[in-house]
Image (tube, grey):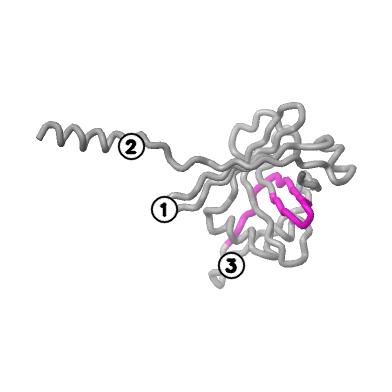
Amino acid sequence: MRFAVLIAFAGVLAACAAPGPRPVVTSATLAAADASTSLLVGAQLTRDISTTPAREGTDPVVTLILRHADGRALSFQQANHAQHDLMAQAPGGPLAQIMGLFGEESPTLYHALPDQAAPFICGPEGPAALGVLEGEAGAVQIVGLKQPIQFETRPDGREEALPFSPDQVCARLRFTAG
């Protein structure tokens, strides 16, 4: 009997100690595609995307890290959980409009992770959020936002994005992924 209890206890400990899903990391070099991007960030950045698979009933956790050639890094987490974040990313929605997209593109929204040590875009405080659109032939467009997209409830009960001031866009970057 003691042996059976010991084996059961060891099984419980092994289950608790077992690591969760391992993240999948993809890296790409982003080469500046225009002069203004080159002036802001240099000739290239490194983009790492780490995706931790979803557990039952949850969304995957996607982390975006942009690394400057001098070693500085900015970290963001994909906004794939909250209802307003999903509404902001809708095709032709608020984020697409902020990014100057007028088709049915649906860019991805990322929120800055706390404690950005040395931002290299959007001034010393760095961006609060990023809009990222991956296009054809490796084109990548990134827009830095000084504040998150905010929503309000209309009198009819529908949720609507508040107007976003153009001065709240702190960076417009264009790259080619390689």
Q: Secondary structure at mark 1?
A: loop
Q: Which residue does the image show at 72% across and 27% down from the upper left? A: 71
Q: CA distance from mark 2 to mark 3?
A: 46 Å
Q: CA distance from mark 3 to mark 1?
A: 34 Å
Query: Furthest residue to the bottom?
Result: 156
Residue type at mark 1? Glu
Give the quarter of the figure containing the C terminus: top right
In this rendering, position of residue 38 left or right of residue 64: right
Q: Which residue does the image show at 54% across and 58% down from the upper left? A: 83
Q: Is residue 143 magenta?
A: yes
Q: Secondary structure at mark 3?
A: loop
Dot 3 or dot 1: first in sequence order is: 1
Q: Position of residue 14 (x, y in %)?
A: 31, 35
Residue type at mark 2? Cys
Residue 80's place in the image compared with 46, above or below, is: below
Q: Residues within 10 Å of mark 2 (few under 14, many from 20)?
A: few
In this rendering, position of residue 40 left or right of residue 90: right
Query: Furthest residue to the left?
Result: 1
Q: Residues within 10 Å of mark 1 (few under 14, many from 20)?
A: few
| Residues shaded magenta | 131-152
Circle 2 sits on which residue? 16
Q: Position of residue 97 (x, y in %)?
A: 74, 60
Q: Which residue does the image show at 49% across and 40% down from the upper left? A: 22
Circle 1 sits on which residue? 56
Instruction: Give me the disc on residue 154.
Output: 3
Q: Which residue does the image show at 63% across and 47% down from the upper left? A: 110
In this rendering, position of residue 63 left or right of residue 177: left
Q: Position of residue 144 (x, y in %)?
A: 73, 45
